[in-house]
Image (tube, grey):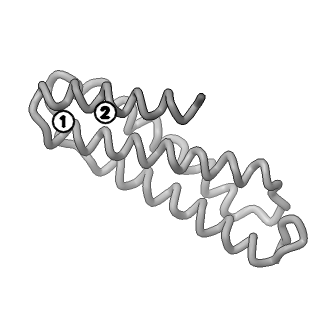
Amino acid sequence: MAEIGGHPAMEEDRGALVQSLIDTINEIASISDYRCVVKKQYCNLARRLKLLTPMFEEIRDSKEEVSQDTLKALLSFMEALESAKELLRFGGESSKIYLVNGILLVGSKNRESIQ
């Protein structure tokens, strides 16, 4: 088993994190009931995220060492995926008015976390 930064347990963490990314992407891809107003954009987002699955499978199956910065980036991406999943679920379950309000709230949360 390859070690990350000299810690075999981190290798397991990497595998679990990447598998969580893959599972979240699959959850996002399975959401399909969107309001007409945003259907095209949401379907495009879900499709593009699904295209990332082979890359994450490659990372998961790789025997090469992964840096701490890479793990931090994967954790940040996981947070972004969770926000996207929340937005897409909201888009399928809400009225148009609440949908627009939700998009604005999620966007402001993301802007705050970036700063």
Task: Say which of 32 and 74 sits in front.
Answer: 74
Query: SS of the residue at dot 2?
Result: helix
Q: Do the residues labelled 2 and 1 touch (CB within 8 Å)?
A: yes
Residue 57 placement (x, y as % from top left): 61, 57
Residue 51 placement (x, y as % from top left): 50, 41
Task: Identify the residue at horizontal 43%, vertical 49% (top origin).
Answer: 82
In the rendered structure, find residue 6 and report the number of the disc placed on it.
none
The amino acid type of the residue labelled 2 equals Cys
Number of marks in picture: 2
**Residue carrying label 2:** 43
The amino acid type of the residue labelled 1 equals Tyr
Distance from disc 2 to disc 1, alpha carbons, whole Å, reads: 8 Å
In the rendered view, does 61 fall on the left or right side of 40? right
In the rendered image, the quadrant that contains the C terminus is top right
Name the residue at the left extreme: 95
Name the residue at the right extreme: 6
Q: Quadrant of residue 14?
A: bottom right
In the displayed structure, 8 sits above or below 59; it is: below
Q: Quadrant of residue 101?
A: top left
Residue 72 placement (x, y as % from top left): 70, 50
Query: SS of the residue at dot 1?
Result: loop
Mark nearer the N terminus (2 vs 1): 1
In the displayed structure, 4 sits above or below 107; it is: below
**Residue carrying label 1:** 34
Q: Quadrant of residue 61?
A: bottom right
